[in-house]
Image: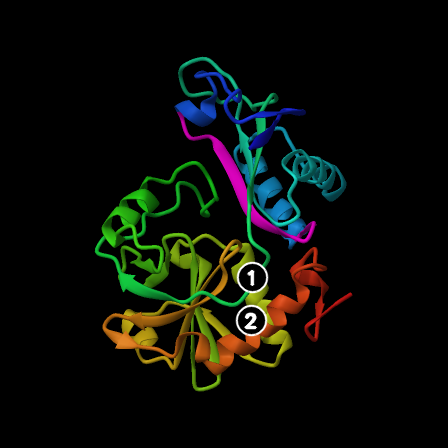
Amino acid sequence: MKLYINGRFMDKNEAAISPFDHGFLYGLGVFETFRIYNGHPFLLDDHLERLNASLRILDIEAEFTRDETVKILDALLAENSLTDAYIRFNISAGNGEIGLQTESYNEPNVIVFAKPMPPAGEMNEKQAVLLELRRNTPEGSARLKSHHYLNNVLAKREAGPAMDTEGVFLNDEGFLAEGIVSNLFWYRDGILFTPAVDTGILDGVTRRFVIELARTAGIEVREGFYKKEEAEAAGEIFLTNSIQEIVPVTSFSGKSFPGKSGEIVRSLFGRYEVLRETLWSRTQLDGGLAK
């Protein structure tokens, strides 16, 4: 596998950064993960919107446009002979002295990873388990997709290594939050529910897309503070993230759910898969069609 690092492509065994990078020393770095479908980086504009906003919060002097990012991605795909790929677009603060820095970072390290993915297929189901570990509060006013991942690592250890199991956090107040690497939705009585961003969750790109996808289909969506009993009483539950897309849940908290046979999840997934190879942003949605 070849990586993109600061304008160069190199083999993964040759890749290196300085131990003085503050992304390593202090966790000052952010990243986006997304999929490329048949050469198209799905929802790239939305990922860059969040990435650039996070860089401003961390005072890292970098900003990425669609055009320059597509050039990097196209070249990286060619270097790795890929058309369908998992992408991690990572920006760390760059080098500094040991000690906390108040000045802005003007020489960040830009590292882009690509892994092969099979062509997109059908939905994969998971079981969801409620975690004992609580979701930590964001380091700042909102949660960033940052290098601070210990809470997620500890949660994964609690949930176990099985790929078909996702742990679901409650926040410190006992409200449903999110999965270890996913956002959470459930459907009941014609309404789609999901925890509000104010519960402390990451505002996932796929989360926002699915909310718009549902609303353009005429489905009422409610974001709020909910106890686990409200999800347990749902007719369907599903998870979302940018790599696994929409993931139907077959069991949660000891109760069975319809998984991929659920009506709402099949409907949303059908609309999702039509748009994989064309959409740049959720803002292009208009009745489920790409402009």
What's drawn in magenta, residue-wise?
26-41
Colouring convention used in this rendered image of the protein: rainbow
Q: Residue at x 72, y 63 (%)?
A: 284
What is the three-letter code of the residue carrying label 1?
A: Arg
Task: Tell me, yes or no, whether the highlighted magenta stretch contains residue 35.
Answer: yes
Please determine whether, in this image, residue 164 is positioned above or below residue 266: above
Q: Residue at x 66, y 35 (%)?
A: 76
Q: Residue at x 63, y 36 (%)?
A: 80
Residue 189: x and y in percent read: 43, 86
Residue 126: x and y in percent read: 37, 65
Residue matched to label 1: 208
What is the three-letter code of the residue carrying label 2?
A: Phe
Q: Mark 2 packing: few (<14 Cα in 10 Å), some, or many (20+)?
A: some
Residue matched to label 2: 269
Is 207 left, or right, of 152 in this rendering? Answer: right
Q: CA distance from mark 1 to mark 2?
A: 14 Å
Task: Tell me, yes or no, whether the highlighted magenta stretch contains residue 288.
Answer: no
Is 188 left, or right, of 2 in this rendering? Answer: left
